[in-house]
């Protein structure tokens, strides 16, 4: 049924809540898991500065150590947990608007299931922070499994 | 300059300026804003599958234009000519200070910053001195600089848009026409910044530079030509007017003391090298060579406007005397009218309305380009340096966006409030930000980059001293203008010897001494920090896309300032490529 499962992650607990679901399914179907970290250009603009957006545009992501580290760490978590279960994990880092990149990646790499976490935010908090998951749902035709993250505290 | 500090509500509307709604100029300004958004959209970073594909690099010329646009604000476009028109010789401090600063930047900081290779200005301070407190102070200073600097921009935009959109005083209860325009223009600017996330930054800045320089220079030539002042080189020909303009314009030190002249110039020079929104560009240029040549081009592009500003001021002053009334003496030209002397000159020369609108639009382009740079530097100081590095290390990208956007809105709101009844002229308001940058950030960059023994304790003591000393003349001269019951300055003696606009002349040497003494009295920084500092100005060229930290990490034992190891660029590049391949393979 599923051959390639995509897990978009930003390294947060919310995103990682989805990882076990993805790995479990992958184990059952003997599928490959793709861990995708999207460098959000908006975030680079507001937190590192517009000049850094130019830097990315010139293809110099490589010299942006801290950013790269964070990306590698996020996808690394998926790879490590995959290794425990002997599931094959492909790590990937892309840049752009997260929902768009996720949808494009799914199309380009023949993904047949996207598993991602969600805050289940509502009201003001949702309006302020938005929901990548919700936008992804609207941008792709690939089935999406949404794992709600319930904050323990 | 003293007159401007007595600014009252009533003369915030520039007399003689034709204030009414004008259709063609309004369309011009709105389509200019639309153009910025379109460019931002067209040249945004494409959603990319692979982050390691090299794009087109940004050349010296384009970088230079970006530096020019980022640099030249309403203070250069309007304020400089205004100061020259009102204060004559004293106004030249802005021309001198704001260009000389770039030489210091070129010689001591541009290429070295490229080697250090981080993201933001507080990044340098935090990493160089290994201290979150130092980072936080630098971040707060960056935010403050953005705020103070932007007040002048808001004032400039509002005055110019009075010409274009007219007087809507009372539209918002309690606010006069000028204040309504402050709110209107700042809302547009903040909206533009928060919406246009993935701007084609450098492209947009190149366009903004082109608009502002064409508008300014064309305005000067048209005024000079039609009024018979000049033909091909108004920048020199205005000299013929000098004797007619009155001693207030041409006589050196007629309206200000030698001391004030020196203090202001010094402050503007060192401030230039400490402004975060100027420095960040050097973190991202492709190589040291690009860093240097971008500075040279940037300076040239800036000078095109600066050579022209005194001529524009002279023409404007003469036209004002002929058509409105004597510029000097009592009552003379009010400061609000002088602020728009560039637009006013074009209007008094009876140039077509669309052309005057173009000159006005150039001022708005200058202000928006600079506010964008300032606010983004401010938002990254809060979002990256304070929030992500200190408060919440696990911050997700979405949280960073939220904090960044909120910082921009906060900056916009603060600026709008302060600009409703600004304390001084555009140029002076911006000058206060330079004093701050020169008192706090420049000493840290200079000592941090050139003296390896500067340490955490020294930096903390130095920055705290700088902030405190900077705020003394500000409280003395500026704060009282916002409090009705007090009269500025609180102490005339202090205002004379430590003027807010030139306070760095006093504060900078003190900050240097404090930093050096405290550094020497405490433990030296770690060897690794020293090596990074040495590598930042080692005579050995470094491979492109390499930072000092990388070199030190790759085998820093042999790194030295004199001689040092011969970095085999080819081998270094080879290693790098292998590393990249490995990274991609995973």
Image (tube, rainbow, N blue to C red):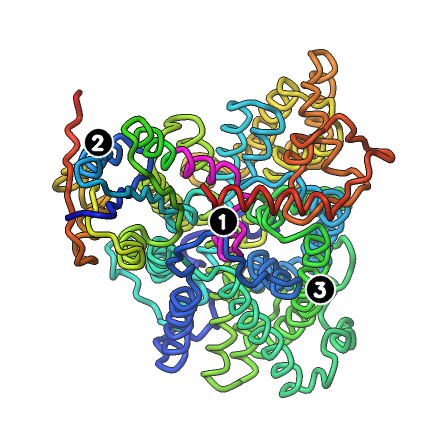
Mark 1 crowdedness (10 Å alpha carbons): few <14, some 14-19, many ≥20: many
Q: CA distance from mark 2 to mark 3?
A: 58 Å
Give percent across and percent down for residue A48: 47, 44
Instruction: List x then y, in percent, for residue A137.
Output: 17, 52
Q: Residue at x 26, y 46 (%)?
A: A6
Given residues B125 and B417, the one toward you in this image is B125
Question: Which of labels 2 and 3 is toward the front?
Answer: 2
Q: Are marks 3 and 1 on the same chain?
A: yes
A56 drawn magenta? yes
Residue range corresponding to the magenta coloring: A53-73
Name the chain letter of the residue that bears numbered label 1. Answer: B
Q: Nearer the viewer, mark 2 or mark 1?
A: 2
* Figure check: B256 above or below A87: below
- Closer to us: B134 or A78: A78
Residue under label 1:
B374
Question: Can you say whether B96 is above or below B514 in the image?
Answer: below
Reading the image, the residue beneath label 3 is B300
| Tag 2 near tag 3, CB within 8 Å | no
Determine the chain carrying the residue at label 2.
A
Query: Do callouts 2 and 3 point to residues on the same chain?
Result: no
Q: Residue furthest front?
A: A30
Q: Which residue position holds label 2?
A: A20
């Amino acid at each position: 049924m599923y051959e390639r499962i995509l897990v978009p992650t930003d390294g947060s607990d919310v995103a990682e809540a989805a990882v076990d679901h993805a790995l479990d399914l992958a184990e059952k179907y003997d599928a490959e898991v793709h861990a995708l970290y999207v460098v959000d250009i908006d975030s680079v603009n507001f937190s590192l500065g517009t000049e850094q957006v130019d830097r990315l545009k010139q293809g110099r992501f490589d010299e942006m150590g801290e950013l790269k580290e964070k990306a590698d760490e996020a996808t690394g978590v998926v790879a490590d947990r995959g290794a425990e279960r002997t599931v094959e994990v492909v790590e990937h880092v892309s840049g752009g608007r997260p929902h768009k990149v996720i949808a494009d990646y799914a199309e380009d790499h023949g993904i047949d299931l996207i598993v991602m976490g969600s805050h289940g935010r509502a009201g003001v908090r949702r309006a302020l922070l938005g929901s990548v998951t919700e936008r992804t749902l609207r941008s792709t035709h690939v089935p999406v499994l949404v794992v709600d993250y319930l904050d323990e505290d | 300059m003293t007159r401007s500090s007595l600014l009252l509500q009533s003369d915030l509307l520039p007399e003689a300026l034709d204030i009414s709604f004008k259709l063609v100029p309004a369309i011009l300004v709105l389509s200019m804003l639309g153009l910025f958004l379109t460019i931002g959209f067209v040249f945004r970073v494409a959603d990319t599958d692979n982050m390691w594909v090299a794009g087109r690099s940004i050349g010296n010329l384009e970088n230079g234009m970006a530096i020019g646009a980022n640099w030249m604000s309403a203070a250069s476009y309007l304020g400089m000519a205004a100061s020259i028109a009102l204060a004559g010789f004293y106004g030249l401090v802005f021309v001198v200070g704001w260009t000389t600063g770039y030489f210091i930047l070129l010689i001591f900081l541009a290429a070295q910053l490229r080697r250090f290779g981080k993201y933001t200005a507080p990044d340098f301070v935090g990493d160089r001195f290994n201290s979150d407190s130092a980072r936080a102070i630098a971040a707060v200073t960056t935010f403050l600089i953005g705020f103070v600097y932007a007040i002048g921009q808001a004032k400039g935009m509002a005055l110019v848009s009075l010409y274009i959109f007219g007087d809507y005083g009372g539209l918002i209860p309690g606010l006069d026409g000028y204040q309504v325009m402050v709110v209107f223009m700042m809302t547009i600017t903040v909206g533009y910044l928060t919406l246009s996330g993935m701007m084609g930054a450098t492209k947009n800045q190149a366009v903004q530079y082109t608009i502002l320089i064409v508008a300014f220079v064309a305005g000067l030539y048209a005024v000079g030509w039609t009024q018979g002042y000049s033909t091909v080189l108004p920048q020199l020909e205005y000299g013929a007017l000098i004797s007619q303009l009155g001693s207030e314009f041409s006589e050196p030190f007629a309206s200000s003391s030698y001391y004030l002249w020196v203090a202001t110039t010094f402050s503007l020079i060192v401030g230039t090298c400490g402004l975060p929104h100027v420095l960040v560009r050097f973190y991202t240029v492709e190589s040291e060579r690009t860093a240097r040549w971008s500075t040279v081009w940037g300076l040239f592009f800036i000078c095109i406007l600066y050579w022209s500003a005194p001529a524009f001021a002279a023409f404007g002053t003469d036209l004002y005397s002929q058509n409105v009334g004597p510029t000097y003496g009592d009552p003379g030209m009010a400061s609000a009218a002088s602020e728009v002397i560039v637009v006013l000159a074009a209007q008094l020369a009876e140039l077509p309305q669309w052309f005057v609108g173009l000159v006005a639009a150039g001022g708005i382009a200058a202000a928006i380009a600079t506010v964008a740079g300032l606010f983004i530097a401010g938002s990254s100081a809060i979002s990256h340096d304070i929030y992500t590095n200190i408060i919440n290390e696990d911050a997700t990208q979405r949280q960073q966006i939220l904090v960044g956007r909120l910082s921009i809105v906060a900056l916009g709101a603060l600026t709008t409030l302060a600009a409703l009844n600004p304390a001084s002229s555009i140029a002076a308001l911006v000058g206060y930000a330079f004093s701050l940058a020169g008192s706090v950030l420049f000493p840290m960059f200079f000592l941090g980059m050139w003296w390896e023994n500067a340490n955490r304790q020294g930096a903390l003591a130095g920055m705290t001293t700088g902030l405190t000393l900077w705020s003394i003349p500000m409280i003395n001269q500026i704060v009282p203008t916002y409090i009705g019951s007090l009269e500025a300055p609180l102490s005339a003696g202090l205002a004379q010897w430590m003027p807010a606009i030139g306070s760095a002349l006093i504060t900078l040497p003190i900050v240097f001494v404090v930093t050096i003494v405290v550094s020497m009295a405490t433990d030296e920084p770690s060897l690794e920090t020293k090596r990074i500092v040495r590598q930042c100005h080692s005579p050995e060229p470094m491979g492109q896309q390499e930072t000092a930290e990388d070199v030190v990490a790759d085998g820093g034992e042999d790194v030295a300032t004199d001689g040092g190891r011969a970095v085999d660029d080819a081998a270094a590049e080879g290693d790098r490529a292998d590393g990249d391949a490995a990274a991609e393979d995973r």
